[in-house]
Amino acid sequence: MTRAPRIVVLAGGVGGSRFVLGVRGALRARGIADTASALTVVVNTGDDLWLSGVRLQPDVDSITYALAGVNDTERGWGRQGDTERVNHELQQWGAGWPWFTLGDLDLGTHLARTGWLREGLTPTHVLERMSHRWPLGARLLPMTDSEVDTIVVLGDGTRLHFQEWWTRHRATLAPVAFENPGVAASTPAPGVVEAIADADVVLLAPSNPVVSIGPILAVPGVRDALRATSAPVVGVSPIIGGKVVRGMADVCLAAIGVETSAAAVAELYGARADGGLLDAWLIAEEDEQLAAEVSARGIRSLVRPLWMTDATRSAALGEAALAAAGV
Ligand code: GDP
Ligand code: CA
């Protein structure tokens, strides 16, 4: 291919941002300087929320900060070198959630975003504006401009906001279902369906299949766009050796009756030839024995190193995902 490939990545926060960095690294290694024209990221906004009057977009911010190189790599979320003075003050007022920390720099982001939303900009336009501060090397699109929530339903019928279940309870309360109020009435953000239709390859990041990729796929029109595109759809397993790498995707998968295995997640997404989404699925070397099972379901399985522990490994994974699609 003489021109740069057009790539669309569907992504959540932490796993999503590492993978997006990897794809950007792979493009740079190919000598493509203008990666922003080649790489579009459709970001999960299902866990966005209002808190103390400001709009939080956890996955959008994780990806933005990571691409800008200002993320806190040790803690895994928020801004490098952030402080918590405002958060302390909010707690003194009894505002917000006592178990939820907002960094000062992070709050600056939320205030800027909320101001622009209040002025009438759509989330797509806000994100476009926020992409100007740092050279991100990718175009970021929210999955939708509508407000969608993620609610966790427990066995006794209790309904918790995803953030309360995740951050306060560390996902220790067994869920029976995840719901996305607002998603059925939502539409894909401008540019999402077009990007998928015009892509040379669509990549499903190794993000949480239930609460990161799941809400994106639940936006009416996205699944159809993925089924209709002529681009190969290639997914990367977030499960390595039967375990989640980080986070609590295993608890989420169990709630929807899916085993924590690379093969079971492939089956959840399904083979494109069989009414599902995937043409190919990258599984870890540790899961090599599952390759035949995945292939038997009509999904080409490729065994590759899936650990994104540094920039080199992440870029190698990005390159492997592009190569799997033949771009
Ligand atoms: P969140 O929105 O911040 O929860 O993050 P994501 O949904 O994007 O990513 C969470 C998923 O990333 C978890 O299920 C992890 O198993 C996966 N993950 C994190 N690091 C790696 C890695 O190095 N390799 C792979 N294959 N998956 C990873
Ligand atoms: Ca998230």
Image (tube, rainbow, N blue to C red):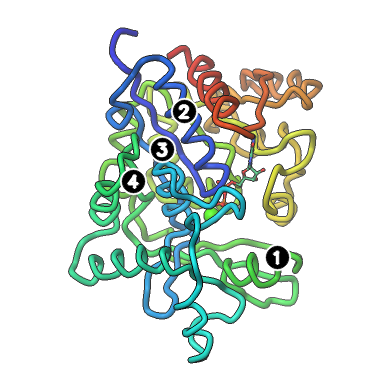
Label 3, on which residue?
A: 224
Ligand 1 position by quadrant: top right
Which image quadrant is residue 285 in? top right
Which image quadrant is residue 6 in? top left
Give whichever of discs 4 and 3 has the lower sequence position: 4
Image point 35% across, 19% down: which residue? 5
In front: label 3 or label 1: 1
Label 2 is placed on what type of residue?
Val
Give the percent coordinates (x, y) of residue 120. Answer: 19, 67
Label 4, on which residue?
A: 141
**For residue 23, which numbered disc appears in the image?**
2
Q: Determine whether the residue tagged by mark 1 lies in a helix, strand or loop.
A: loop
Give whichever of discs 3 and 2 has the lower sequence position: 2
Label 1 is placed on what type of residue?
Arg
Q: Residues within 10 Å of mark 3 (few under 14, many from 20)?
A: few
Q: Determine whether the residue tagged by mark 2 lies in a helix, strand or loop.
A: helix
Instruction: Report the side of 143 relative to 248 (left or right).
Output: left
Label 3 is placed on what type of residue?
Asp
Give the percent coordinates (x, y) of residue 178. Answer: 61, 61
Q: Residues within 10 Å of mark 2 (few under 14, many from 20)?
A: many
Instruction: Report the side of 8 relative to 242 (left or right).
Output: left
**For residue 170, which numbered disc appears in the image?**
1
Work out how far the residue at label 4 is from the one at label 1, CA to CA, in angstroms: 28 Å
**For residue 282, which numbered disc appears in the image?**
none
